[in-house]
Amino acid sequence: MIVRSEEETVPAEQSAGRHGRRMGGHSALLGFVERYGLLLLLVVECVVFSLLLPDTFATVGNFKSMASAQAITLLLTVALALPLRGGEFDLSIAGLMTASGAVTAVLLSNGVSLVVGIAAGLGLGLVVGFVNTGLIVRLGVDSFVTTLGMSTALGGLAYAVSDSTVVVNLPEGLLALGREQFFGLQSVVWIGWGIALVAWYVFEFTPFGRYLLFVGGSPGSARLAGIRVNAVRTAAFMACSLIAAFAGVLLIGNVGQMDPSIGSQFLLQPFAGVFLGATAITVGRVNILGAIIALYVLEVGITGLQLMGAQPWVSDVFNGTALVVAVTLSLLAARSRRRA
């Protein structure tokens, strides 16, 4: 048997301690970059484009414009995050936004009161939510297929209601709802941020947010733990549809008209935002703060490139690529968390 002296043992222990500290520091750095890398990317984008385009990008007006441009997309992203956190898809958000806007615009342009017109748009959201939950939660139809079909149907409804024309002559009350200025930003921006803040609080600090996460991870285990899985899924779909319908009302109030063909422009970015956001802040999980950061990463990148002279189609390429990368990174992050 070999007996080590105290002098031999102490340096070995010190070496192991130093190695452990180095590994711990390395892991902490990786964890920081993993959580806040997307936020750092946003900062880098802003700095680089500000240096390259000081007269066009680095202006208060441009930052206000970017905030306004993302307001409706932010609402749809929050809506989408609800069922996705619970493990379900909802592809009907853009179609519902368009149909809700069309119903509201047509009624208001024909003299119906502002309250009734907005209530009709939101009511359509509730109906769609009930239909989606009935098919998906109660009957077990796949959410991807159900909401894809619903999106197509709602897109057709928007054309039918508007008679395939752009609806104008909207009342001043509705325009004020979407355009009124507060502290230099349009009301639609503040409303979007406010709803996102509420969703963030629900996700991070309420039992419903935790239940939704458990249901998305394993519905069977959640049910065994006493969680009312169907009730949680129903609430997620209903809230998603209601927010998407409200986005349609705000959209027409902000732009001052209703174009029934506008829906397709709003589907890709919310998915890219949610999946890319799941690679930041709370890695591997759908989270609101990460999704917001991801949306502005996309918006800043596209705006900067277009101000540098890029063609309009660059936004489609940018968003499509971002979605593919985001889904891949989100999947890898989830696998990493399971192994850990």
Image: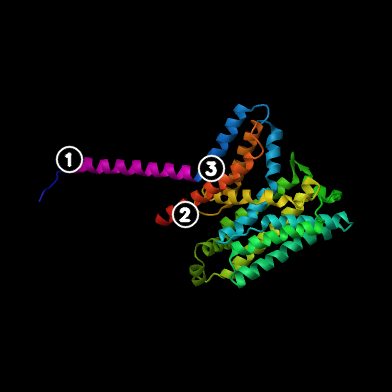
Q: Give the range drawn in magenta.
A: 9-34
Above or below residue 70? Residue 331 is below
Dot 1: few (<14), some (14–19), or many (≥20) neighbours within 10 Å?
A: few
Please indicate whether residue 12 sits to the left or right of residue 134 in the image: left
Residue 287 screen position, x and y as percent: 56, 53
Above or below, comparing residue 82 to residue 181 in the picture: below
For mark 3, what is the residue?
38
Residue 21 horizontal side relative to residue 148, left or right: left
Q: Which residue is under mark 2?
A: 334
- Which residue is at the far right? 111
State the image coordinates of residue 265 (x, y, percent, origin top left): 68, 48
Q: Is the magenta stretch mostly helix, strand or loop?
A: helix
Who comes first in sequence, dot 2 or dot 1? 1
Give the x, y percent position of residue 121.
77, 59
Residue 18 shown in magenta: yes
For the residue carrying disc 2, how many other residues have a C-alpha within 10 Å: few (<14), some (14-19), or many (20+)?
some
Name which quarter of the figure residue 161 lies in: bottom right
Residue 299 visible in this rendered orientation of the protein: no
Disc 2/disc 1 C-alpha distance (Å): 46 Å
The amino acid type of the residue labelled 3 equals: Leu
The residue under the point 71% across, 34% down is 61
Who's the residue at 71% across and 47% down the image?
Answer: 190
Please state which amino acid type lies under the numbered disc 1: Glu
Which residue lies at the image location 85% right of the left edge and 55% below the top edge?
108
Residue located beneath label 1 in the image = 7
The residue under label 2 is which amino acid type? Ala
At numbered mark 3, what does the secondary structure look like: helix, strand or loop?
A: helix
Instruction: For the residues labelled 2 and 1, say whether their Cβ atoms are less than 8 Å apart.
Output: no
Q: Earlier in the sequence, mark 3 or mark 2?
A: 3
